[in-house]
Image (spheres, rainbow, N blue to C red):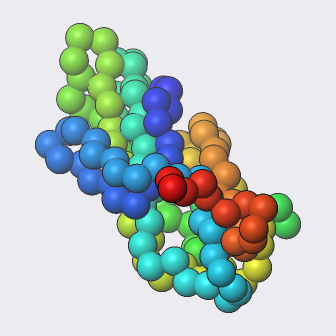
Amino acid sequence: MTVELLTLSDFAQDAFGKLIVVGVFDAIMVKEFPAVHPFMAIAARIRFPVYELGEHQARVEIKDSSGRQLVPPLDGRLNINNIGTDSACANLTLNLMNLRFEQEMTWHISLQIDGQEKAGIPLFIRKVSAQNRPPQLQ
């Protein structure tokens, strides 16, 4: 299997096999701590070759460098049975609401299939300052 996409976004949805992803990001900028981020989505697209038909266990974890979890692990099952000529894709979307961040740090989002990490991405939580303010049009 191959993870074709793993990302954070403002919105993600599977619509009849099409993965809709809007507003991809890897950093949240806040004015002060603690901060609550109202909504974000994790989206993944995973391709399985024909010889991997069947059920697969999926898990998403969000941890810091010391192993502390932001939320409990998110577990689910993927049932791969709709193969094209040689492979099939599964889309995974997870909506996360009102996540609380206590300090500036980096989180690691891990996608595991059948107990093995297959992809990972960072989530940077940063305090806005004059040096890291996003550019604006004049």
Place of residue 4 in the rendered image (x, y in percent of width and height, measured from the top left):
46, 30
Of residues 115 and 66, the one nearer the viewer is: 66
47 displayed left or right of 85: right
Residue furthest out toward the bottom: 34
Q: Quadrant of residue 40?
A: bottom left
In this view, 106 is above or below 32: above
In this view, 83 is above or below 106: above
Residue at x 24% of width, y 23% of height: 83
Of residues 41 and 131, the one nearer the viewer is: 131
Q: Quadrant of residue 63?
A: bottom right
28 displayed left or right of 15: right
Q: Would residue 107 be seen by someone viewing this image from the given angle?
A: no
128 displayed left or right of 51: right
Residue furthest out toward the right: 66
Place of residue 92 in the rendered image (x, y in percent of width and height, measured from the top left):
37, 49
In this view, 19 is above or below 71: above
